[in-house]
Amino acid sequence: KGSNAREGDADGTRERLYKLAGERDMIRECTKYHMMEAEARTHSFKPQLNPSLPSNHVPIHLRANKVIAEKQEKLNALRSSLHGGGDQEGGGEASAASASSSALAVTDPAHQRLHSEAARQAEKSVALQSKYEDMEREANTFKPSLCAGSEGLVESYKNKPFLDRQREREEKTEEKRIRIEEEAVRGYKDMFKPRLGKRNEEVLMKNRPEVVCEGAKERVERLSGKDAERIRGMKERICTEEYSKYDFRPRVNNISKALAPNGSSVEELVGNRRGVEKREKVKREQEERVKEECTFRPKVSKSVPRRVKETREERGGSDRAVTRSMGSVDLNNPEGITLQVRRYEQMKEEKRMATIKDREMDELKDCTFKPKTNMGKRGGKGGGGKGRPVLVRGLGRYLELRNLSKAKEEEKERREAAAFRVPARLVKTRYPDGTTQVKEFRLSRGKEGVKERLKKEREEKIRRECTFRPKTVEGRNRKVLEGILSEAGSEESSVKGWGAGAEGGEFWGEIN
């Protein structure tokens, strides 16, 4: 009874603590909200919104002329208010630059003046560039002379695009290859036919007169077969004559005669028929010995299992389909491969669990121990009877952790499906045959930096080995060019100064 009372007090304390924690959280949120409100009241800034609607705004490039006209009207109204509304002459005298700029402002609009100034600046840059090119042309007096063939090539390919030139080059290369092949075939046909001298003809007529009058067919037969047989017979005759000089005959004793088989030929000695038969005999004896040691003889059931019968009926009695469904995956149906693999794994797991249960049952057959429990007495002593629930410590936490684990697993499956599963509409449109389209990809790009570094190191090493430093005028010409380009955006006075300096010979010395 004391333990039950303590358990009831623990439940009440837990509920009370949860309630107090909720109330404290609500108090913190209210306090935070009131503090933010008080801080906001201390700020006196009140923003003023634009009363005009953004929908009435027009882009600047569409209302540029209107803005210019309004600005001009405001200037005219201000000018008239300053002069008292009448045409009054001013007492001051304007400068020439002000007069020219005011005249331009009266005659031309601002955008036209800007365009004209940009055009004049571009003309000025072109003039300076042409002047520098003339100076460089006069300084560099070397003019290479080209032969007539080079000039003809340049003129022929001058106005043709790159692809046309490449096509013509490929056509010429193909024509050259065909011409070489034709010359090779022609050379095979017109093979070298040596002319025999008078002495050689006499020797041939004396030794082999049939060769002189033979035709093309007889010559082919002679070169392919008859000459080979003649040369072979000549070699055999020479060997016979050479070996006939030696009359040594070895003597074989009785033991060697007994060991050697009677009438053995070369084929028997090479094939070793007796050795092959002996190896086969030893192999058969070894197989029989292994069979005698392995006494296990499995019993094969002739009846078909029920699962196989059901699968055969579903698939129309096809043994091949049954075998595929039981032990492999049908690759002809790519859409259902995943489902087939899952079913196959589930079937293996069920079979494994059934085997484990059968083995445990076989092991527990001999166990006759039947323990007696006192669950009924403990329930009666508690006063609640059999219907009273049993208190299990830690069951609530266990159920909570199990629910959390299950939620995590579901979240993981959902994320994996969102990341890796291909939607059905994409499968129908992009992959009509149900297969993944293989594309090239680069797994790593780290070698590009290494290649660039090795290339730079090699170039630096070659540059260090080249100790020759020629003296050229390219650096000075580049400095002059940079000075000209920097002066291209300056005023007219600087351009005049450049012309005076050029006439006075300030840059001629550096260029020459």
Image (cartoon, rainbow, N blue to C red):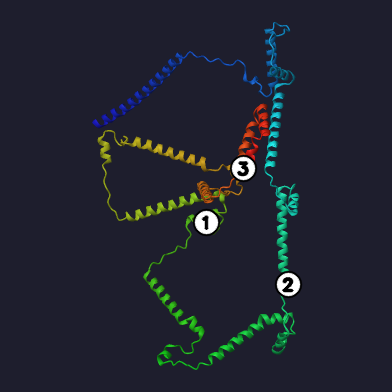
The reply to whether the C-beta atoms of the residues labelled 1 and 2 are less than 8 Å apart is no
**Residue position marked by numbered label 2 in the rendering:** 189
* Residue farthest toward the left in the current orientation of the protein: 2
Could you tell me which residue is drawn at 65 percent across and 38 percent down?
A: 508
Image depth: mark 1 or mark 2 in front = 2
Q: Secondary structure at mark 1?
A: helix
Q: Secondary structure at mark 2?
A: helix
Q: Amino acid at mark 1?
A: Arg
Looking at marks 3 and 2 on the same chain, the residue that comes earlier in the sequence is marked by 2
Could you tell me which residue is drawn at 74 percent across and 54 percent down?
A: 149
Image depth: mark 3 or mark 1 in front = 3
Q: Secondary structure at mark 3?
A: helix
User: Where 281 sits versus 3, above or below?
Assistant: below
Which label number is shown at residue 474?
3
The residues bearing labels 1 and 2 have C-alpha atoms spaced at a distance of 63 Å
- Quadrant, the N terminus: top left
Looking at marks 3 and 1 on the same chain, the residue that comes earlier in the sequence is marked by 1
Image depth: mark 3 or mark 2 in front = 3
**Residue position marked by numbered label 1 in the rendering:** 324
Which label number is shown at residue 190?
none
Q: Is residue 376 visible?
A: yes
* Residue 384 % position (x, y): 29, 33
* Residue 410 % position (x, y): 46, 39
Looking at marks 1 and 2 on the same chain, the residue that comes earlier in the sequence is marked by 2
Q: Amino acid at mark 3?
A: Glu
* Residue 131 % position (x, y): 70, 36
User: Where 178 sits versus 149, above or below?
Assistant: below
* Residue farthest toward the bottom in the current orientation of the protein: 247
The residues bearing labels 3 and 1 have C-alpha atoms spaced at a distance of 80 Å
Q: Is residue 63 visible?
A: no
Observer-nearest of 450 and 239:
450
